Image (cartoon, rainbow, N blue to C red):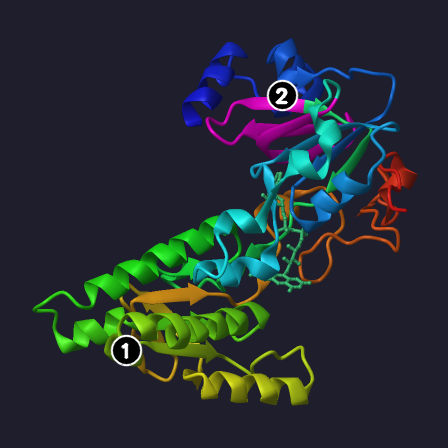
């Protein structure tokens, strides 16, 4: 990616987007780097193929817009079923839907799906600046209407070791990784000569975060151990341990009755509930703020979400929590050139309302 960026930079005499301006820079990259408008219809560019992007792609009338969808994922993931796909109840493939199935008009020549990430939005020029997922090749796409549906990213709160040693549960690829690790640890634990402490570590799954995702995963895993692994090897299944660590209370956004019900169900299913704050994650063990050290074979991290660096970099108003601020019609807000505002971008020359 860096090599390509350097080659561009050399070709442009070392001048970047800042000195050349967006249009001149896009032009200097060559005609191929900017998708020309292909019909007389306005071009709708959708960033992201998650719930938001896929829903808009499905509902939009392709007779009214040329559609370009840009996302590093060519499919939508049915997230509520990800936890089930970790333990084999479902295959990871069956929780995904190709974006071209969601909007078949993407197969028409005036419409595009581009496997790439958007790096920046240039509202004055109505261009999105993107790079391909595979090799970082830079390109621009012109839009008349832009829908930003790039989602969020998992929160780590800057806790050391989370990114390196834990597994998130946000995507179909994550469930494949989790499943692979579970199978690996299950197998490794029964190798002759394995020490009892190491065996116990391998058979211990820690789930950090008692929100809906953590609770659902812990519950699915407990069912899997009791109903499936117990048939394979009852002794080893009995030694499997699942610990759910939550800093505050389980399912804090739910009402008290549901919280108590979930806690009771999990405990009965054999999930060990621990109230604590993770201070550091190390390879094979994590440490809580109270000093307790917990060895683990697999640690799944699910402590909520926050804004991505992409959405933070966008030139629009943000909420207190760093998310994009929108009006009651989901239009982003921006300030006028003279600093007045914030107001919806449509009023300062930006967007169009697309909802029904
Ligand atoms: C395991 C799990 C279970 C869940 N269960 C439920 C549930 O039962 N009910 C419920 O209401 N919610 C549930 N959720 C939450 C729900 O999935 C999210 O609220 C939803 O995915 C948000 O949709 P979105 O379109 O904003 O973002 P996402 O679905 O995260 O999609 C973002 C998209 O943007 C793409 N993208 C990211 N960066 C860029 C970029 N720079 N350029 C272009 N594209 C980009 C991504 O690849 C992705 O395609 C669950 C979440 C998880 C993880």
Q: Secondary structure at mark 2?
A: helix
How far across and how far down the image is residue 69, in percent?
A: 69, 33
- Locate residue 210 relative to residue 52 in the image: left or right: left
Q: Nearer the viewer, residue 23 or 341?
A: 23
Q: Quadrant of the N terminus?
A: top left
Q: Which residues are magenta?
A: 111-140
Which residue is depicted at the point 85% across and 34% down?
Answer: 61
How far across and how far down the image is residue 8, in percent?
A: 51, 16
Q: Nearer the viewer, residue 215 or 32?
A: 215
Which residue is depicted at the point 66% across and 12% down?
Answer: 27
Q: What residue does disc 1 label?
A: 234
How far across and how far down the image is residue 139, in percent?
A: 61, 22
Nearer the observer, disc 2 or disc 1?
1
Give the vertical position of 61 relative to 244 (above or below): above
Give the vertical position of 104 relative to 166 (above or below): above
- Locate residue 57 relative to residue 274 in the image: left or right: right
Q: Nearer the viewer, residue 350 or 211?
A: 211
In magenta stretch: residue 119: yes
What's the CA distance linking mark 2 and mark 1? 68 Å
Give the vertical position of 182 relative to 53 (above or below): below
User: Badges 2 and 1: C-beta atoms under 8 Å apart?
Assistant: no
In magenta stretch: residue 243: no
How far across and how far down the image is residue 163, in percent?
A: 41, 56
Q: Residues within 10 Å of mark 2 (few under 14, many from 20)?
A: few
- Locate residue 349 relative to residue 185 in the image: left or right: right
Q: Residues within 10 Å of mark 1 (few under 14, many from 20)?
A: few
Q: What residue does disc 2 label?
A: 19
Numbered label tally:
2
Q: Quadrant of residue 124?
A: top right
Which residue is depicted at the point 43% across and 62% down?
Answer: 87
């Amino acid at each position: 990616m860096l090599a390509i960026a350097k080659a561009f930079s050399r070709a442009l005499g070392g001048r970047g987007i800042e000195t050349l301006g967006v249009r001149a820079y896009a032009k200097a990259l060559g005609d191929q780097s900017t998708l020309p408008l292909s019909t007389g219809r306005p071009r709708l560019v959708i960033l992201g193929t998650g719930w938001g992007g896929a829903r808009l792609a499905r509902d939009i009338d392709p007779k009214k817009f040329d559609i370009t969808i840009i996302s590093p994922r060519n499919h939508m993931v049915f997230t509520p079923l990800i936890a089930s796909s970790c333990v084999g109840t479902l295959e990871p493939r069956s929780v995904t839907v190709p974006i071209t199935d969601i909007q078949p008009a993407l197969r028409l020549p005036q419409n595009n799906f581009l496997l790439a990430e958007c790096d920046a939005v240039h509202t004055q020029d109505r261009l999105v600046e993107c790079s391909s997922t595979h090799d970082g090749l830079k390109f621009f796409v012109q839009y008349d209407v832009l829908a930003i549906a790039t989602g969020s990213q998992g929160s780590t709160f800057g806790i050391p070791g989370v990114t390196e040693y834990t597994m998130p549960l946000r995507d179909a690829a994550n469930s494949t990784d989790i499943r692979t690790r579970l199978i690996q640890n299950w197998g490794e634990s029964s190798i002759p000569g394995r020490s009892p402490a190491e065996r116990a570590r391998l058979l211990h799954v820690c789930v950090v975060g008692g929100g809906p995702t953590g609770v659902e995963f812990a519950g699915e895993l407990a069912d899997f151990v009791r109903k499936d692994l117990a048939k394979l090897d009852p002794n080893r299944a009995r030694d499997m341990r699942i610990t759910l660590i939550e800093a505050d209370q389980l399912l804090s956004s739910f009402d008290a009755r549901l919280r108590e019900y979930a806690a009771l169900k999990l405990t009965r299913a054999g999930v060990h509930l621990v109230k604590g704050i993770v201070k550091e994650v190390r390879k094979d063990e994590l440490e809580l703020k109270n000093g307790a050290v917990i060895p683990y074979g697999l640690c799944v991290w699910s402590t909520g979400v926050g804004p991505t660096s992409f959405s933070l970099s966008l030139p629009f108003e943000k909420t207190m929590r760093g998310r994009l601020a929108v009006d009651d019609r989901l239009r982003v807000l921006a300030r006028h050139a003279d600093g007045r505002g914030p107001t919806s971008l449509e009023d300062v020359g930006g967007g169009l309302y697309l909802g029904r």
